[in-house]
Image: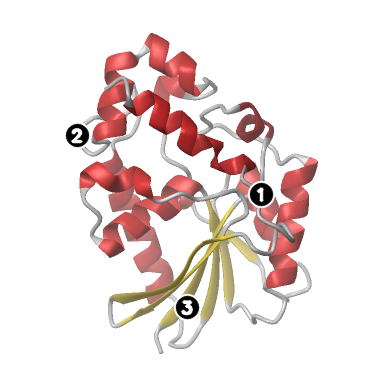
Amino acid sequence: MGVKLFLIRHGQTVWNLEGRYQGAKDTALTDVGLKQAELASKYLSKVKFSSVYSSPLKRALDTANIIALNKNACVVARENLKEINFGKWEGMKFGEINAKYKDDYMGWLEDPFQNPPTGGESFEDFTKRTLEEINYIIGSSDDGANIAVVTHGGVIVSLLVYWLKIPTSRWRSIIQRQGAINIVVVDKGFPYISQINYTGHLNPVYDNNEDKVIEIYSSLKDDC
């Protein structure tokens, strides 16, 4: 059966709401973000987790603690589950980055493997550490174990891009909404992906508010 990974993006933060790049900066959940974590916990209430791992950043750790509550599981913080380091872009909005670091930003949107954020981490280095971490987690788990990994959108995207062998030019095709749940069974090194970016637990009806990031990326791409 392998190891079943529940890859969960943290809930909403103030910077998410304002459209700012967070990266390695420590930001707190909003009331909405806390509610998203509670709803994720409820959705996963019948899952018995052997372990719960989390990024050490507050937004992920707070989400993980809510999910682990009443599950008799301790949350283990792991440095390599941190979001990508966006360098000088952290704390800035999309438009501000595009205005001040346009060439770097356009290069990153086109190919983050060859064009890291200004003063930040390349997608190649980022992917190496996220893969190293997830392989460590799998190697530390018993066959058939259910493992919660509460982390960031970039971490989840990097893993999905690698597992699905998505071309560099299409890395932005995968969206991760706040509070989203992804389910992957890794057996003998092969990933069986049964759920990507699931958010049905968060709203009774479809809400397209978070998909505004697609409009932003699309408008910026027109400038390339």
Check disc 1 and report the residue beneath it: 207
Mark 2 falls on what kind of element?
loop
In which quadrant of the rendered image does the N terminus lie? bottom left
Amino acid residing under circle 2: Gln
What separation in Å lies between label 2 and label 3 (alpha carbons)? 32 Å
Q: The disc labelled 3 sits on which kind of residue?
A: Lys
Query: Which residue occupies 47% across, 38% down?
Result: 214
Q: Quadrant of residue 27?
A: top right
Circles 3 and 1, Cβ within 8 Å, touching? The answer is no
Task: Name the residue that disc number 2 marks.
Answer: 114
Say which label, 2 or 3, has the lower sequence index: 3
Q: CA distance from mark 2 to mark 1?
A: 35 Å
Residue closer to the observer: 35 or 209: 209
Q: Which residue is mark 3?
A: 4
| Residue 29 in the image, given as x and y percentages of width and height | 71, 41
Circle 3 sits in a helix, a strand or a loop, which is it? Answer: strand
Q: Which badge, 3 or 1, is on the more N-terminal residue? A: 3
Q: Quadrant of the C terminus?
A: top left
Q: What's the amino acid at mark 1? A: Asp
Vertical relation: 46 (above or below) 56: below
- Would residue 126 be found to the left or right of residue 152 on screen? left
